């Protein structure tokens, strides 16, 4: 189609999730001609899709919500400390309606390809409908966990019962009562689902390949009075989050692990175990992340808690990770998860002993048993962080494919831009702090930075922005250094780019997908870059 007939935009934002909603708000306020293209038929991203039973925040609700509008902060009442998925969707709709953002969003608009046109200095985008449009700048808000990865077992398509990935949990109610349900996967998602449905199904079979550490979420309702206190404290809450390494209110303990006695440490952990959310990780001694002996002692403490909660000692041992220390993979938080295994209708199938051989028409065949099932839930994770980029045929200067550039792992400048792909600006991109910290706090900082860059471009009449190759190399080295400093480097999870269901992402191949340095340090770095006139970028 000739260019003059195409829809032309100054900015296209891809994705109407938590990041895209705030990004379009900022662009509209700036008076920029911008539109959001959303593949799905509604806004909400991760919260629209992940409607499986038990899905809820594991960040404190009032640290998850947007901070940009005092009115919004004053109006919204978070009903629970860790708000559930339906309420989260109500919130995101409320925000979109309040700021009249929906009219800047186009749904069922999946971007299939975007090719850089060096002559025009514009991105040419094509939707899967075949529709084309062009944009000066593309801002990706496509989600770190938006490409679900079902397992690659033989026979998956033969199963005659109901089967789906948790990300695709149907909108219609799913019958659970009296049914034989299998859940494959025990990450944060599997742990939430299992705990929630254990007492609602007939029989529940948990297919566990490797156990994860998990600690209590300690959720609670938020009364009107408590919400009033939270509202009065919002400035302080967001300042605390901004100051902390993980973007939470929980502050690391710096008394020194080895300065205390074992008994003092245990007393401290008893207290943390009762605290909400990620306190057990974020408010713990900083040594637990890098000092093997410190991490081992804490892991043994948490293992003791699991042994206390699970009645059958053999089952308890199977639920305790032996291949990685506590907090060295993304920590799932739970509500009576371990107690589920005390129920007669819940059966743990340890795939390390009896691997799945295939899915059959009526169930799952392991090396030992055939388990008859009515419903199989795949809680098997995502092609994380770079997966959503790989779905789009992104071609940069000289027609180079982004998927090729990132084949062995992403390479970016601060997760915001990548050399060879001018005017593609990423919110919560690979090698930013987003994945490794309280997500929305990092998103807001990212959107603010990106918006300032767009404003700068408008102001200066810039039409081309590209990351400098050397600056990018230096950032990747920094990302690797931060990764090497912590015990997480030896673990196997999406934080280290592992996914057994994606070719090239299997165990043993580290992909440096996230920055594990402290969020304040990261933010200071990108803010300094802006203040200095973006020396790491070529602006033209
Ligand atoms: P995940 O952490 O990647 O866990 C996937 C699980 O599936 C692992 O236990 C994995 O076992 C297992 N698995 C994968 N393929 C398998 C196969 N072929 N056979 C058997 N088991 C298989 O994915 P997730 O649980 O969906 O969580 C992803 C992320 O989403 C979380 O880390 C978190 O950041 C986010 N999340 C957040 C919340 C929240 O509370 N806000 C809730 C859910 C998820 P192996 O380890 O052996 O591969």
Image: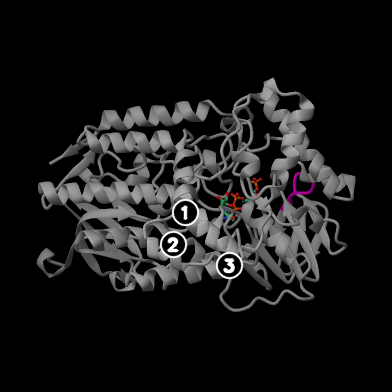
Q: Which callout, 1 or 3, points at the residue further toward the start of the chain?
A: 3
Above/below status of 489 relative to 54: above
Answer with left or right where residue 510 lies relative to residue 292.
Answer: left
Element assignment for label 1: helix
Residue at 68%, 65% in the rendered image: 376
Residue 366 visible in rendering: yes
Residue 108 visible in rendering: no
Quadrant of the rendered structure where residue 420 is? top left
How many numbered callouts?
3
Q: Which callout, 1 or 2, points at the residue further toward the start of the chain?
A: 2
Residue, disc 2 = 73
Q: Is mark 1 within 8 Å of ligand 1?
A: no
Above/below status of 538 relative to 127: above
Q: Are marks 1 and 2 in contact (CB under 8 Å)?
A: yes
**Mark 1 surroundings within 10 Å by alpha-carbon count, few (fewer than 14), some (14 through 19), many (20 or more):** some
Q: Which residue of the protein is positioned furthest toward the top in this rendering?
A: 259
Q: Which residues are magenta?
A: 351-356
Q: How is the image coloured?
A: one colour
Chief secondary structure of the magenta portion: loop
Cα distance in 3D space between marks 1 and 2: 8 Å
Residue, disc 1 = 234
Image x and y of residue 6, in percent: 16, 68
Residue at 75%, 55% in the rendered image: 337
Quadrant of the rendered structure where residue 1 is? bottom left
Cα distance in 3D space between marks 1 and 3: 15 Å
- Residue 220 in the magenta stretch? The answer is no
Image x and y of residue 454, in percent: 22, 50
Q: Nearer the viewer, mark 2 or mark 3?
A: 3
Residue, disc 3 = 224
């Amino acid at each position: 189609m000739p260019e003059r007939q195409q829809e032309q935009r100054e900015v296209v934002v891809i994705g109407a999730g938590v990041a895209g909603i705030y990004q379009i708000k900022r662009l509209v306020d700036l008076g920029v001609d911008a539109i959001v293209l959303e593949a799905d038929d509604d806004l909400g991203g991760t919260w629209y899709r992940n409607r499986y039973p038990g899905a809820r925040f594991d960040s404190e609700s009032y640290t998850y919500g947007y901070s940009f509008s005092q009115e919004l902060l004053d109006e919204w009442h978070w009903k629970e400390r860790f708000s559930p998925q339906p309420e989260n969707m109500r919130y995101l709709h409320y925000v979109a309606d309040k700021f009249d953002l929906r009219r800047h969003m186009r749904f069922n608009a999946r971007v299939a390809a975007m090719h850089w046109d060096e002559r025009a200095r514009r991105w040419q985008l094509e939707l899967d409908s075949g529709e084309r449009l062009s944009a000066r700048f593309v801002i990706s808000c496509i989600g770190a966990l938006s490409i679900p990865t079902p397992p690659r077992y033989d026979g998956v398509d033969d199963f005659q019962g109901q089967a789906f990935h948790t990300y695709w949990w149907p909108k219609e109610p799913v019958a659970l009562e009296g049914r034989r349900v299998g859940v494959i996967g025990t990450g944060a998602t599997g742990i939430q689902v299992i705990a929630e449905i254990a007492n609602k199904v007939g029989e529940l079979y948990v297919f566990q390949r490797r156990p994860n550490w998990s600690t209590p979420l300690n959720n609670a309702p938020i009364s009107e009075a408590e919400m009033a206190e939270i509202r009065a404290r919002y400035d302080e809450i967001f300042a605390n989050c901004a100051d902390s390494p993980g973007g939470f209110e929980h502050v690391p303990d710096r008394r020194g692990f080895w300065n205390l006695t074992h008994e003092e440490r245990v007393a401290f952990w008893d207290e943390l175990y009762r605290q909400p959310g990620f306190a057990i990780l974020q408010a713990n001694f900083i040594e637990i992340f890098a000092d093997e002996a410190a991490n081992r002692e804490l892991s043994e403490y948490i293992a003791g808690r699991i042994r206390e909660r699970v009645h059958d000692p053999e089952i308890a041992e199977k639920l305790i990770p032996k291949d990685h220390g506590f907090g060295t993979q993304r920590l799932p938080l739970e509500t009576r998860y371990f107690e589920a295994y005390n129920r007669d209708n819940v059966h743990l199938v340890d795939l390390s002993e009896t691997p799945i051989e295939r899915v059959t028409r009526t169930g799952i065949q392991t090396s030992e048993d055939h388990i008859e099932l009515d419903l199989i839930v795949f809680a098997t994770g995502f092609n994380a962080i770079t997966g959503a980029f790989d779905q789009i045929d992104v071609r940069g200067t000289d027609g180079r494919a982004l998927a090729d550039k990132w084949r062995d792992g992403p390479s970016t400048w601060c997760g915001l831009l990548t050399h060879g792909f001018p005017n593609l600006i990423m919110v919560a991109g690979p090698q930013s702090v987003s994945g490794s910290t309280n997500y929305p706090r990092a998103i807001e900082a990212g959107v603010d930075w990106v918006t300032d860059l767009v404003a700068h471009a408008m102001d200066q009449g810039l039409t081309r922005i590209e990351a400098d190759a050397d600056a990018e190399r230096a950032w990747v080295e920094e990302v690797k250094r931060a990764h090497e400093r912590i015990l997480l480097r030896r673990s196997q999870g999406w934080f280290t780019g592992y996914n057994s269901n994606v070719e090239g992402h299997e165990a043993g191949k580290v992909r440096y997908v996230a920055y594990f340095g402290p969020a304040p340090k990261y933010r200071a770095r990108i803010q300094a870059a802006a203040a200095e006139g973006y020396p790491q970028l070529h602006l033209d």
